[in-house]
Amino acid sequence: MSSHQSNHISFGTDGFRGIIARDFTYDVVRKIAQGMADYISHKYMRTEKPTVAVGYDRRFMSDMFARTMAEILAANGYDVTLSATPLATPAVSLLTSKGYGMGVVVTASHNNHYYNGIKVKQNGRSAPPSVTAEIENYVAKAVPMKPSGVQVPVKDFRPIYVEYLNSKVPAAKVQAKLAGPVLVDFMYGVGAETAGDIFGSKNVIKIRERHDPLFGGISPEPVEKNLQELVAAVKKHKALFGAALDGDADRFALVSDKGQYMTPCQTAPLMLEYLLSKDKYKGKIVQAVSMGYLTKRIARAAGLPFDEVPVGFKYIAEKMLNEDVTFGVEESGGYAWKGNLPERDGALTALFVMEMVVKTGKTISALYAEIEKKYGKSCFVRRDFKMDKPIPNKHSFAVKIKKKLPKLLLGHKITETNTIDGLKIVLDNDWWVLMRPSGTEPLLRTYAETDSQESTKKFLDLAFKFVEHK
């Protein structure tokens, strides 16, 4: 997120973001573009300069900002191609595995319509923190070039993306075998740009597909409160399930055949169990520290290594690039698995779930009942608290609370305290709570998972008391 006061352009969990006309302006876009150009010229001083693909989402003026970005890069002598249409973020990641050295997307992902932002892609995934930190340093000193008379070539990148998706899950073939309708909710986002090609079957009902830069008045984030329209449509059409994609189509959310919103802590085990049934995977299961225990229990049962990383899909991507990883998942609805790019992809996840329903011949609710029977129940809740002021140092915040913890919580022993991203407390029965200060805004994100709504609520209340008394 940008910090408006200090006027410093920083790349947060996944890119730079700011309010349009306040933090996100043409000047800021030019500065970031020039900073990137300076970074590239320094980094690739003795080697061939990478080609750059520039994409953008359906937000207000994203196409204009993207053109400005491309023109500044081109003015610096780089080989740049601009997308001819709005494009899903994972499609830009794909381009960086198909000949483009770098990718840039003008998007604010799942944020409200008055935000815009920039994501940087490399090697089929989000640029790692080491790269974005270097770019930040160049941006701070950047003096943008004047792009006079620069012509930027434009290309429709959608066919490359459609071909990639079909190579992983043959969309038409799988959809023809669906035993009933499936709903896909685009939340007015960029996923709808390839909807005709990927979700064109008569078994797929598409909602919130049209281009609306106001996203129907809600933020295009696939969380329960924003998916009431999808839940109603699943019930009305007696659908097999509902899938929702976020504003830039890299996140996915699932609604069961019963019209039940499935949390990522419930969706991930469903996907993992099916993935493991398909093949003899030996790789690690990697998840964000804000994810649940069912995946951990499945990994344990399958004898697979298990690892937790800080919040931000880039940390999962990094592991997928450098280690043998079978499945990666984050709490905000990002899923990736072996054989694909180390990147989350909403459309690919929707196709995967269609395939799962076709191949198992079971409903989502029946598959999930099997998970609960084998691995236990999951009641996961996230609650955000407004604070008086931001907590600048996550680690010292975590250490302070850790020192004051009692031996028992909710009648159970504490078996683990994890401080890689805030403080995660794990009990001897796998129940856990995570307290994660935002770092950039006066906000504390708390997450908890137990086997009942009542216990989860108790755990969250307890966490808030720790913070109040720290």
Image: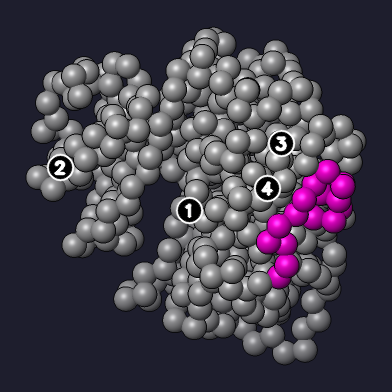
Q: Gap in Å between the C-alphas at discs 2 and 3?
A: 42 Å
Q: Amino acid at mark 3?
A: Leu
Q: Which residue occupies the foreground of this view, 104 or 454?
A: 454
- Tell me which label, 4 or 1, sits earlier in the chain: 1
* Count of numbered tags: 4
Asked if residue 431 is positioned above or below residue 265 in the image, the reply reads above
Magenta part of the protein: which range? 195-211
Q: Are marks 2 and 3 in contact (CB under 8 Å)?
A: no
Identify the residue shown where x is 71% and y is 49%: 184
What residue would you read off at disc 1? 225
Asked if residue 204 is positioned above or below residue 159 in the image, the reply reads above
10 Å neighbourhood of mark 2: few (<14), some, or many (≥20)? Answer: few
Mark 2 residue element: helix
Q: Which residue occupies the foreground of this view, 128 or 397?
A: 397
Q: Closer to us: mark 2 or mark 3?
A: 3
What residue would you read off at disc 2? 465
**Tag on residue 240?**
3
Is residue 451 at all visible to an observer of this figure? yes
Q: Are marks 1 and 2 in contact (CB under 8 Å)?
A: no
